[in-house]
Image (cartoon, rainbow, N blue to C red):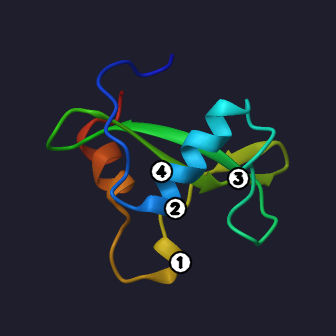
Amino acid sequence: MPLEGEYAPSTQQWVRDQVERYEATGGREAATLGDTGLPVVIFSTRGARSGRLRKQPLMRVEHEGAYAMVGSQGGAPTDPAWVGNLRTHPDQ
């Protein structure tokens, strides 16, 4: 079920640009993670503090027909914001 509510674009320009282009073209464009060629999906969460709709491109990782979401932020020592959003609103 898609999330509904007021959309709050990312504070990161590249994320805003990618989500906008992906959605405007139905995923025909901006469907890879930067210049890596790795496919992405647009994942929506509800902001942990604001309650507003947030969207972020996540690398699409598939193994034997199952998909995984990895909140590694490229191996950073802290979680990306979407992980906190999901922990606060796991059913949304």
Q: Is residue 2 above or below residue 23?
A: above
Q: Are marks 1 and 2 in contact (CB under 8 Å)?
A: no
| SS at circle 4 | helix
In the picture, the quarter occupied by the C terminus is top left
User: Which callout, 3 or 1, points at the residue further toward the start of the chain?
Assistant: 3
Residue 60 is tagged as 3
Residue 11 sits above or below residue 9 on the image: below
Residue occupying the point 77% across, 45% down = 29
Secondary structure of the residue carrying numbered label 1: helix
Residues at circles 2 and 4 in contact by the CB criterion of under 8 Å: yes
Task: Specify the label residue 16 is tagged with.
Answer: 4
Q: CA distance from mark 3 to mark 2?
A: 18 Å
For label 3, the SS is loop
Can you tell which mark lies on residue 14?
2
| Label 2: which secondary element | helix
The residue under label 1 is: 74
How far apart marks 3 and 1 lie (CA) works out to: 14 Å
Identify residue type, mark 3: Arg
Residue type, label 1: Gly
Of the residues under marks 4 and 3, which one precedes in the sequence?
Answer: 4
